[in-house]
Image: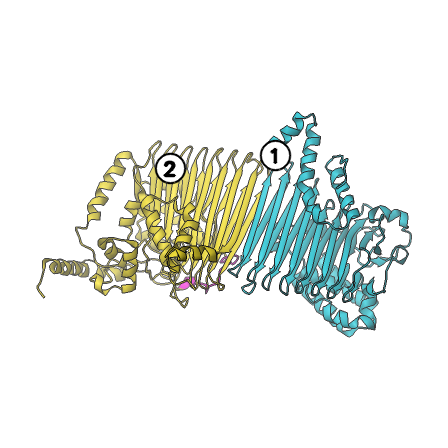
Amino acid sequence: MAYTEDDLKKELETKEYEYGFYTDIESDTLPVGLNEDIVRAISKKKEEPEWMTEWRLEAFRHWKTMKEPEWANVHYEKPDFQNISYYSAPNKKPKYDSLDEVDPELLDTFKKLGISVDEQKKLAGVAVDVVMDSVSVTTTFKKTLAEKGIIFCSISEAIKEHPELVKKYIGSVVPKTDNFYAALNSAVFSDGSFCYIPKGVKCPMELSTYFRINQAGTGQFERTLVVAEPGSYVSYLEGCTAPMRDENQLHAAVVELVALDEAEIKYSTVQNWFPGNKEGKGGVFNFVTKRGLCEKNAKISWTQVETGSAVTWKYPSCILKGDNSIGEFYSIAVTNNFQQADTGTKMIHLGKNTKSTIISKGISAGKSQNSYRGLVQVNRRAANARNFSQCDSLLMGNKCGAHTFPYIEVNNTTGKVEHEATTSKIGEDQIFYCNQRGIDTEDAIALIVNGFSKEVLNKLPMEFAVEAQKLLEISLEGSVG
Amino acid sequence: MELKDKLVSSFLAFEEEYGGENDDLHNIRNQAIKDFEQFGFPGRKEEAWKYTSLKSVLKHDYSFFPKKNDSIEYRDIKEYLINDIDTYNLVFIDGVYASHLSNTTHDKIDVCLMSSALNKSPYKAVIDNYFNKIAPKNGINSLNTAFTREGAYIHIHKNKMADKPIQIVNFSTGKETAMFLQPRNLIVVDENSHVQIIERHQSLTDSPVLTNSVTEIFADKRAIVDYYKIQNDKSDASLIDNTFIEQKAESLCSVHTFSLGGKLTRNNLNFYQKGERIDSTLKGITIIEGKQHVDHNTLVHHIEPNCESHQDYKGIFDENSTGVFNGKVLVEKEAQQTNAYQSNNNVLLNDKATINSKPQLEIFADDVRCSHGCTIGQLDEIALHYLRSRGIPKKEAQGLLMYAFANNVLDSVKIPELKKRINTQIAHKLGVEVGFNL
């Protein structure tokens, strides 16, 4: 075979990686186990200021006194926290040299999702063309954002460059002592994103696009902080529709949103971590704490599509502190094979005339368990609070389970809370109707599931909605019968 | 001394005095007190007791062994009985059977006492088969089992129908200051039989009383059981009511709970459906005020296919009162074609009142129809305006709307006199005059 230019490029790349990064990796990985020295070491590696180190240590000391929560409706072998390496530099060495070496099953999925070849390479861990489009795109993005005064960078960068902002807001919504995993994350978070939208600025693009291209091994303890100053707007998307094959088993992320007066944050998540194989072996444990704080007239909207992870434990919440603030939660959780998901939301109504909407769609197939767990709390001062919740579950096969655990606490006469839940299966008549019109059963199910999830899919940014829809189909593949 | 320790240490004296000669029973009691020692009273850390704290009711210095009290006459208790129809009555005063106020039978059906059933040989087979079989082990139930002594024993034999309703009424006189009562009822309804039961706990004085009652009900094939609980006690009377119902194929059971009074009321109501085509109904009306606390904790366990369950709980809460609804529908994977419906609607009349509602569904079967709905809100402003614009004062208009809100639960009450009685009580409580009979 002729030696082409492409081959040369690839060879150069590989060489560069060999010399550039390979040797570094060893020294960048901390020994397994967790103690104060490790926490200090992480902080030092990140070149963090003194206050940050102290903050981490406080979190760590508190974490030691805490116990792993057991109330969730999930069963798994608990990770050994002393057997994890809490810091390793992002793995920059490509796993594969070309797409041919990648698991064909994975490629097949990419194809179905309609992901471009360049992105496929990136996602599968294939060495990517150096002059890939995205680099220039990234630069353009950065320029546009900077012009508007928007800060969007990694959290470690933010700690160094904007310490006053980080210091003010970090831990203000999810205190470092909030829960077991949040405390662990606070002590050892490796990296994450920081986003700051100045007063009155409407972020000109979905931060999703940017994020997707830049997402390089964010590590297992991710920390995200989004601050929207009064009157600003931002739409943020994390995650990716493509399946992430990650070697880390435990993921404990923390996401904090601060929406000041009249600000609006739209936070969308597509989560598709490795769910384990068909026998239920392996897979990622996803224990996430997400919370947003709404000041006066502010609005926070969570949208999530959860299809991956062996165990998901996730409750994006809104604290509706300011008067007239609005919280929304739209969720689709799909579980197949041996997956377990315990997910939902908390809406804490503190201010007057606060409103919240919860739409949760659970789809369980195979031998999976899918739970909705939500809290709607209307406090004494929250006059005229309004909540509407709807949780629908769809069951496929009789080996899976769907569970609903709504908690409703109302302390105010003017509060109006409505909760509705239904559980059903796909009607035989619906399938028959489709079959009759020449749509085979598998497609018919996809069609019906899409209809079932439409309310939530509609809330996703346009280009993602399309992919998420395909993702649902793929997640449920082979669950018929 | 803590109440728990006091109970444990008085167990020996209890066994000595009331233990009887039945060895099996003796073993059950001993095991139960051990279980109670291990579990203790439930605390708020337990998920099922998250919203209800027993602390305030456990602090009294209760006496456990009541003396027989003969001073109560029929006229003292008349108003607490459904007295305008003929019924079988089982009246207990301070946990002791009052024969002069009761009316029992052994004619085709057995309506008699737990104490005699436990110790007399003709009942041994039934006791062995059914006693303490479905009440799960936990602090509350085991405590009752350990101190099982008196209560109602009702056995409706095959193909028989109880010719009149049965009333089980537990009075407390508080002669010895604070009382701790633990009635234990066993109700066995054989194939194709039918029974209607009204149960009430009533304090005759203002001294504190805590009742921990356990009732086990077995409905065999095609049996029909209608059970009504009236809870309208004095302001220092607390009740932990534990009712367990096992249903066989094609049986029909309904439990209506009317919680209109008392200090702290906790209803643990569990249905186990062990057969096909079973129908279970759980309904309740709660209207409370002051510092009253009512907690409904229900479980419907769908084990086999083609069964139905209907739950409908309504609550009106005023002043500092607290309402809790914790309903659970559990559908096993064999229970295909289940139809489970659960609804909990509440009205808050005061900013200091609280409602905690947790309607849960746990479903493992795919071909089912389960739904639950929960609302917490206020009276419809438009309806209120409509009534007021027609010259009905605000207060009365509110009363009328609340009355209408609660009233549809009464539709399924099958004893007309009872329906009328509850109806009047509710109307009275809401300050409405109802000039018509339903």
Count residues near mark 2 (Cα–Cα under 10 Å), then give few for <14, some for 14-19, many for 20+: many
| Observer-nearest of A173 and B294 | B294
Indicate the position of residue A60 as horizontal and vertical percent values: 43, 54
Q: Which mark is residue B172?
A: none
Closest to the observer, A249 or A183: A249
* Tag 2 residue: A228
- Secondary element under disc 2, as helix, strand or loop, is strand
Mark 1 = which residue?
B380
- Quarter of the image for residue A301 reads top left
Q: Is A338 drawn above or below residue B376 in the view shown? A: below
Q: Quadrant of the C terminus of chain B?
A: top right
Tag 2 near tag 1, CB within 8 Å: no
Q: Are the residues flagged by discs 2 and 1 from a single subunit?
A: no
Left or right for A436, reference B160: left
* Residue at the limit of the structure toward the left, as seen here: A2
**Res B222 seen here:** yes
Image quadrant assignment for residue A273: bottom left
Chain letter for yellow, please: A
Q: Residue furthest front?
A: A436
Residue A362 highlighted magenta (yes or no): no
Say which colour chain B has.
cyan
Tell me residue B264's x, y (percent).
71, 48
Q: Which residues are magenta?
A: A67-82
Rendered residue at 63%/47% (across/down): B324
**Main SS of the magenta segment?**
loop
Mark 2 against mark 1, which lies toward the viewer?
1
The residue type indicated by label 1 comes to Asp
Instruction: Say which of A410 and A222 sits in front.
Output: A410
Which of these two is toward me, A128 or A169? Answer: A128
Which type of secondary structure does the marked residue at label 1 adopt? Answer: loop
Q: Chain of mark 1?
A: B
